[in-house]
Image: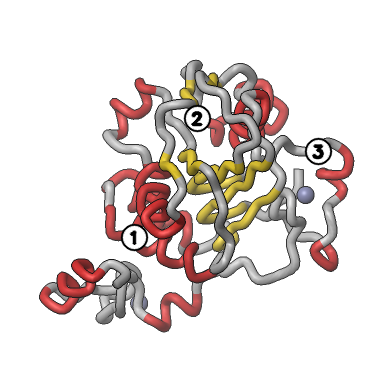
Amino acid sequence: MINYRLKINQLLFPQACMLCAAPAGGELALCPDCLQDLPWQTSSACPQCGLPSHDSQLCGNCLKSTPAFDRTRALFNYAYPLAQILQRYKYRQALHIAQSFSTLMLQRFYGISGFDRIIPMPLHPRRLAERGFNQSLEIARLLNKQLHGTLDTASCQRIRFSPPQASLPLKARVKNMRGAFRCEQRLDGQRVLLIDDVMTTGASLHALAATVKAAGASHVECWVVARTQAKG
Ligand SMILES: [Zn+2]
Ligand SMILES: [Zn+2]
């Protein structure tokens, strides 16, 4: 039932592993060996922000300054070869990689559902025009087919064009995101799933979650492909 057409396509056009070019299996663009070697997030992590944390307890950062989102789930640590895979995905618009990420999220976070809407990290229209596609939207679109929420690209907008976060030191990142988003619709009592490719300090997701909460959302969860593990 799941992605029947995709399966037929793969019989006709088998995929090669994006890392080693061996034949890849199923819906993934990775062979079983490369898949196993990826830096899966397996160690215990803070449930709220996804950073390493003893016994999966709330970490010191979250206790000190609580993020606006309630939960974070990450597939991978942001380590080799995730940076390379994500670069390829983002700049070559390799949509089969979005398929792999969404399939892996659904496998890994199996049974977690009940979201009223799924909101991919919005790009500023200028950035979208530069890049040609929103990397988080493509993953969210595929997840939404299985999670049966509402894919929502309309209610939250990025209203301020800001420099890429990666070019800024930590304090400036938080400041850079202030007033970055606007939500034009009430989301009272809704459970919202936010999708992003990489979570670094969490400043963007925090700002987006705060906007969604201010619009009335009751629960905000983040699913990201990769989480950097540096504290701070
Ligand atoms: Zn491989
Ligand atoms: Zn935390």
Residue type pointed to by label 1: Gln
Residue 192 left/right relative to 94? right
Which residue sits at x=61%, y=24%? Answer: 177
Residue 40 in the image: state x and y as whole percent.
Answer: 57, 69
Query: Residue 145: horizontal and vertical position, in percent?
Result: 36, 55
Q: Nearer the viewer, mark 2 or mark 3?
A: 3
Q: Position of residue 138 (x, y in %)?
A: 35, 47
Q: Is residue 164 left or right of residue 41?
A: left
33 shown above or below 90:
below
Would residue 139 be found to the left or right of residue 54 on screen?
left
Report the residue marked by disc 1. 99
- Residue at the image point whose x is 82% and y is 44% from the top: 62
Instruction: Please report whichever mark, 1 or 3, sits nearer to the chain's N-terminal start.
Output: 3
Q: Does residue 216 sit above or below 119 in this rendering?
A: above
Distance, label 2 to label 1, CA atoms, is: 25 Å
What kind of colouring is applied to the model shown? secondary structure
Q: Is residue 175 above or below residue 35?
A: above
Q: In the displayed orientation, state which residue is furthest to the left.
A: 12
Q: Residues within 10 Å of mark 2 (few under 14, many from 20)?
A: few
Q: For the residues marked 2 and 3, what is the alpha-carbon distance in whole angstroms?
A: 24 Å
Q: Amino acid at mark 2?
A: Pro
Q: Earlier in the sequence, mark 2 or mark 3?
A: 3
Between label 2 and label 1, give the one nearer the viewer: 1
